[in-house]
Amino acid sequence: MGRKESGSFFREHVFFKEESMNNLRVRKIAFTAVLAAFAVVGSFFSFPVFGAKCAPAQHLANILGAVFLGPAWNVAAAFIASLIRNLIGAGTPLAFPGSMCGALLAGVLYRLVRRLPAAWLGEIAGTGLIGGMLSYPVARFVLGNDKAALLTFVVPFLISSAGGTAIGAVITVAMKRLGLLEAERNTSGGRHGGSR
């Protein structure tokens, strides 16, 4: 292969990689927006538990984001959803630690082991335990709730996240059986083996 041909091949190969990366970025941005919108709309189907507004749709979104987006984009989707919910009066500041901790831990654990139960466990532990405890300073110093304690929101957050995670488990297992998880990974540049 001559210098001209090799240079042309290199440019075409690099351009294709850059185009693929751009397409992947656009797809991730689009899916992030879809998950955020789903969580916002789903927040209208919520229920109060010990002073917190629990919305299972956010936890379902976190599960899907962990599998298809990874931790960073998943946290971004959770933050956007929480921000919009607060701006339109459909949520409280407690939505931030709850949703974002679950999104982060679900995404990190799924990326590390590539097993669906890792995403489910990450969502429950991230939202219910970590998010629940981090909600204490928010409730105490932002919302002025003097009765709040470190573990006040752990139980309601665990209840909410367990409900959303159960729905997410059913959906992700069904998607896996249909081959949709593997197909998505092949088109999103995933480098790890299949999920189980």
Image (spheres, grey):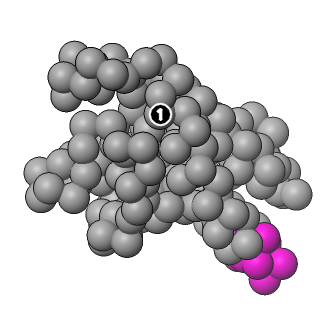
Query: Residue at coordinates 21% horizontally, 58% vertically from top-left?
Result: 90
Of the 4 image quadrants, the one containing the C terminus is bottom right
Secondary structure beneath label 1: loop
Residue 8 appearing in the image: no
**Residue pointed to by mark 1:** 153
Residue 173: in magenta span: yes
Q: Pointer 1: residues within 10 angstroms few (<14), some, or many (20+)?
A: many
Residue 68 placed where, x, y %? 58, 58
Residue at position x 24%, y 44% in the image:
92
Outermost residue, bottom direction? 178
Check residue 2 for magenta coloring.
Answer: no
Residue drawn at 47 percent across, 28 percent down? 152
Furthest residue in direction right, as rendered: 196
Q: Say which of 148 and 69 sits in front.
A: 148
Regarding residue 100, the answer to whether it shows in the image is yes
Taking the image as shown, residue 26 lies to the left or right of residue 157, namely left
- Give the extent of the magenta segment: 172-180
Residue 191 x %, y %? 73, 46
Q: Where on the picture, by quarter, is residue 112?
A: top right
Could you tell me residue 115's position as x and y percent?
82, 49
